[in-house]
Structures are given as structure tokens and as C-alpha cells.
Amino acid sequence: MQDQVSSFVSRSQLPPLPPPGDTSGFAGRVRTHLFATPFDAILTALSLTAIVYVVWSLLQWGVFDAVFVGSDRTACIPAEGREVGACWAFIGAKFQQFLFGLYPLDQRWRVELVFFALVALVAAIAIPRVPYKRLNAILLFLVFPLVALVLLTGGRFVLSGSMIALVFGLGALATLLVGSARSSRVGGDILMTIARWLTAVAIIVAIASAYVTSDRVMLFRFPFTVLSAAALIAALAAIALAVVATLRTADDRINPLSLLYPLLAAFAFVFVLTSNFGLPDVPTNLWGGLLITLTVALTGITASLPLGIVLALGRQSQMPAVRLLSVVFIEFWRGVPLITVLFMANFMLPLLLPSGVSFNQLLRVLVGVSLFSAAYMAEVIRGGLQAIPKGQYEGADAMALTYWQKMRMIILPQALTLVIPGIVNTFIGLFKDTSLVSIIGLADLLGTVRRGFSDPQWITPATPATGLVFAAFVFWAFCFGMSRYSVFMERRLSKGHKH
């Protein structure tokens, strides 16, 4: 019996059998996925019919019956026996206006230079293999905004003493944060405590000096009031004390120059904005088209992320006042529509400013959009913070890290990685919402395209559809690019749940 059983046992691994003939190859996959049942076959046939009809209609409208060349509306007017589809000649004639608005022709090289610099810096940050990421980040987020502002406007801004004092007050606040990140023992130092109070006094007095009149003095060729000069001196003293306190309590030896970066940034900000570089002034009411769209979108994106992080941390703070202020801010801006925010920024913000201080319309919109998007960004980031296991917080506390060291090195990197889809989704929504600025008179891309419809030289039945399709394609291209890069970053960081 043993011999008979063993004769049927295989002594080597048998080769795998080929799949059934009706499921292998292209025909098998089509049969399995599209025509597996009669109902699937009917759905496939209906879907293919709809797709063929839509694609053929689009090709016929956008290619076969389209007009690509023409100098005026006569090229796109249907004639007897002639169908006219898309009027791409209208897009070609207005293309420069769609990009730059009414920006002077002889100065459009400045806009092109800003576009090229933006593309180069974003590519250097986005492509993983490009080296010097920290330098590229500094150039993109700190240097590029100032250079772009001067190039696009012409520079030569008039800064009041209260504004300069506020800039240096914020520089002092940044110095405190840098010092806290470099030294775990600086929080208990008496000099750092004094620096904190001086920074708070500098910021409060700088804001108050814009509303309270006092005697005027000249400092560094800039007009200051007594209050704003006192705020500037307090800010400089706070920076000096914070640097000394950090150097004498640092765990490791650090470069003193690294603590002065905020001070140097404040000096560079004032110098660049007030200097004369010989560029003609171009007021923002001449801007338009894609220039306005990218300006509003990029400013909102750049400002909303750090503001959102601060608000999210504030909402989870253990200090009741900070938590309350963060909650009130977030819930207020999330409770009003963006259109209302734009109207408030355009008409109500000037009422809150001191007399003699005025912001142009574009700057008011940038402030409103940034605050609005920051509230939504804060909730996205708060979701990431809540998703971090409690053990990560406890482990950071066990390593005796300060609050900002814990957030910067352990908590925030993980939280931001987890909510990449939510962050990019907020960015995409903000980019599309920039079209609402046309309601208050700013000529963004969509607004410029719509204004082109009323040009007597291009009033045709095909002009509106062609212009709207062009604008929709531009918005889709930018939003789709952000979406695909988000997917790429998720895969690269490998944060998906793997089983």
C-alpha cells in the first residue's frame, strides 16, 4: 500500500497552469472587465457611444470648424453654408492682455522675469534631486517676494515710522523663536525674559503709534514719532538681549550670525522697499489677467500655511487666552463667505486704518484672502496634529525638548505629512476662488477674458464659449499640476497605510 501511494506523489514542483483562454490577453481583459455580463455590455456600449459623441463634438467644435487666424470678428462670423466653431483667433489677439492686463508694453519684461524666476525656484524646490534645498527655500519664500514686489511695482515705497518699528518688532519676535529653538535653557534666562517683554512692548507701541499723534523726529532719514522711535529702540534692544541670552545658554556652540538673520531680514526689507532702482512706477490698477490670478493665489498660499500652523497650535494651546483668540479668529473667518470677505477688505478695512494710511485695492484683497484661507488651513493642520499618537508628544517631553523644538523637529513634520491631501485641496480651492476678485473690480484671468467679450472688434456668437473654455483650461492646468504633485509627494513619503 505504501508503494502505491508514493507513486502518485510529485517529486518536483509542477509548472503553473496557464490562465483560461478567455481571460488572458487584451481580448480576455476586455471581455472580463467590460462585457462580463449582459448588463455590463449594455453599460459599456452606452458609455462608448457617449464618449465618442462628446469627443467628436469637441474635435469638431475646437479643431475642424475652429478659426485659428483672423484680425477681427469677421473671421469668426458664420457665413452661409459655413459652420464656425471655436474662435481661437480671439484668444490669439487677446493673449497678451489675458496674461498681463493693461501692464505697459515696454515694461512687461519685468513680469516675464518674475514668472521665469518663480518657475525656476519652484522647480528647484519641487524636484527632489535638485541640491541646496534650504538655499532655494530661502530664495523662494524670503528673497523672491521682495524682488517680485519691487519689479512689478517699481519700488520706492514710503514707509512710516510705525511700520518700520513694527517690522523690527516682528524681527525681534522671530529672533526669540530662533533662540528658543537653538537653546533648551534659554527660556529661564533673565535676559530672555526681558527680551520677551521688550518685544511685546515694541509691537504694541508700534501699532499704537499709528493711531496716537506725538512729536516727530528723524531717524536714519525716516520720519518717526516719539512712540514709533521708542518702539524701534525696544525692538533692537530685545534682539540684542535675545542673542546674548541664547549664546550663553546654548547647549552646543552656535554661529552668532545665525541669530541675526531676522534682524538682517528686517533691514533688507526696509532697504529694498524704500530704495530707488530706477524702475518706472506701475500702479496695481493696470495689472490684470493671469498676473492678478497668480499674485492673489500665491500670496494666499504662501501666507495661509504659516498662519494656519500658528492658529492650529494656538487652538491646541494650554493657555486659555491664546486658545480663545485662535478659536474666535478661525470660527469668524470660516463663518463668512469669501465674497463677503472681499467686500469687507475693500470697503471696511480702510475704516480701521489710522488717518492718512491707505492701502491700494489689491493689497486689501491680499490681506482678506490670506486671513480667510488661513482659517481653513488651521483646521486642516489641526486634524494632522490630532492624528499624531500621544507617545510622540511624551517622547519629545522625555527628551527635555522645548515646546518649539518639539513642534519643529517631531510633531509638525509628521502632522504636515499626514494632511498633504487636505493642504493641497485648500490650495486648489483658493486658486479657483481667485476668480471672485472680479466682483470688486479687479481684472483677474476670468475677469479679463469676460471683458474681452464686450470688445466691438470681437463680438461674435463663438467668442464667449471660446474664452470661457480657454480660462477653464488654464485653471485646470494649474489645479491638476498641484494635484498630481501632491500624489507624487504622498508616494515618495510612503505615508499610505500598507497591509
Image (cartoon, grey):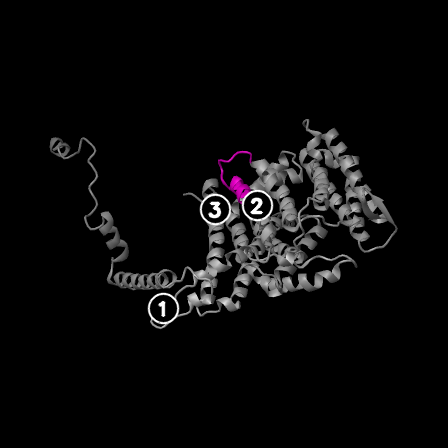
Disc 2 packing (10 Å; few <14; some 14–19; many ≥20): some
Q: In the image, residue 30 lies at what x, y percent? A: 25, 53
Instruction: Describe the element under mark 2 as helix, strand or loop.
Output: helix
Instruction: Identify the residue position indicated by label 1 in the image.
Output: 83
| Foreground tag (1 vs 3) | 1
Residue at screen point 71% across, 37% down: 264
Question: Is there a contact, CB below 8 Å, between mark 1 and mark 3?
Answer: no
In percent of width and height, residue 457 lies at 50, 67
As measured in the structure, the alpha-carbon distance from the residue carrying label 3 to the one carrying label 2 is 24 Å
Expressed as whole percent of the image width and height from the top left, the position of residue 469 reads 45, 61
Q: Is residue 304 magenta?
A: no
Question: As drawn, is 472 to the left or to the right of 372?
Answer: left
Say which amino acid is labelled 2: Leu
**Distance CA(mark 2)–CA(mark 1):** 41 Å
Residue 129 shown in magenta: yes
* Residue 461 located left or right of residue 222: left
Which residue is the extreme one toward the bottom? 80
User: The C terminus lies in which quarter of the figure?
Assistant: top left
Q: Read off the residue under disc 2.
A: 113
Please, what secondary structure does the residue beneath circle 1 have? loop
The residue to which callout 3 is attached is 485
Determine which quarter of the picture holds residue 431.
Answer: bottom right
Distance from disc 1 to disc 3, alpha carbons, whole Å, reads 41 Å
Range covered by the magenta-colored residues: 119-132
The residue closer to the viewer here, 310 or 110, is 110
Of the numbered discs in the image, which one, if any, rests on residue 21?
none
Q: Please report the residue visible at 16 percent of the width from the left and 34 percent of the height from the top.
A: 9
354, 361: nearer the viewer: 361
Residue 482 visible from this viewpoint = yes
N-term-proximal mark, 3 vs 2: 2
